Every structure is written in C-alpha cells, then in structure tokens.
Image (cartoon, helix red, strand yellow):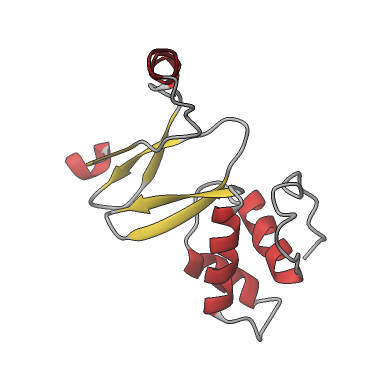
Amino acid sequence: MKKCEHNHDKKLNQFRKSKNMDSIINILEAATSPVSAEEIFQITKKDNKTLALSTVYRIIEKLLQAKVIHEIIKDGDKALYELIEDEHRHYMICTECKKLIPIDMCPFIELEHQLEKNTGFKITGHKFEIYGKCPECSK
C-alpha cells in the first residue's frame, strides 16, 4: 500500500501516527462510498496479517475524535465511516437492501445560518439521514 498523502495531518497532531492509521486513511480516501470497520479490517488485513479488528476500532475512534471522519448509522445499528471533506454529504438509506443514495444538496445550510444569527450558537456540524425503500425495493 502506498504511503498516505493526505491533508488531515493537522487534525491528527494529537495522536501518534502509525502505519495502520495511514492504511485506514488510505482506504477511506479510495472508497467511493462509506465503509464499515469490518470492511476496513478485511482490506487492511491483506497487507498486515497481525492486525486485530480491535485496533481498527481504536484507530476509527481516534479519527472520529480528531474530526477526520464521520459516522453514518445504517439501519439503526451498523456504523459506516467516510472522510470529512470540504463538502459534506447526506444519504437516503434503503431499509430493505441497505443501499446508500447520496443527497446532492444540504437542506440545512440556510437553517444553520439563521439559527446562528438568531441564537448566537456556533454550529460545528450536523447529520441528516433519510430511511425508506429505494425504487427497486418499492416494486
């Protein structure tokens, strides 16, 4: 696996960097959709036979604390992870087939500005997920 080249270094200064952390960040950078800890473990395990799933979860926790990744709760209990980019995403999640469908816009941008203006509350983020049946499962 290639050396991790990302712009998350500033956020990770509080943690000791490791080859495993770099591998996990590389996997998340290459992912085209959010991935589970188990999927990250299976991919990483190919290059590192001694890696434990608990290590993957510890690194994920550090990445969440540093606000490098965020968590999407799928179907009420399964967590998926993706890197926090300049532009955040929201998803519609099919309760039947578990497909994630990205929402191309954020319906909360104006609401956030208005809430900050009206309350003085400094908003640092939000989550928005819609659950239902995709067109294929609705047939």
In the image, residue 88 sits, relative to residue 80, either above or below, namely: above
Farthest residue to the left: give it.
139
Quarter of the image where one finds residue 128: top left
Q: Position of residue 5 (x, y in %)?
A: 80, 51
Q: Position of residue 100 (x, y in %)?
A: 39, 44
Of residues 53 and 110, the one nearer the viewer is: 110
The foreground one among 58 and 97 is 58
What residue is at 38 percent from the left and 19 percent from the top?
119
Q: Quadrant of residue 13?
A: bottom right
Which of 133 and 83 lies nearest the eye of the viewer?
Answer: 83
Residue 97 place in picture, x, y as percent = 28, 53
Q: Residue at x 75, y 69 (%)?
A: 18
Residue 4 image point, x, y percent: 78, 57
Height in image: 82 above or below 1? above
- State which quarter of the image contains the N terminus: bottom right
Residue that protrudes farthest toward the bottom in the picture: 50
Residue found at the very far front of the displayed protein: 120
**Residue 131 position (above or below residue 50):** above
Left or right of residue 139: residue 20? right
For image coordinates 71% across by 54% down, the residue present is 12
Q: Quadrant of the C terminus?
A: top left
Residue lying at 61% horizontally and 54% vertically, measured from the top left: 28
Q: Quadrant of residue 131?
A: top left
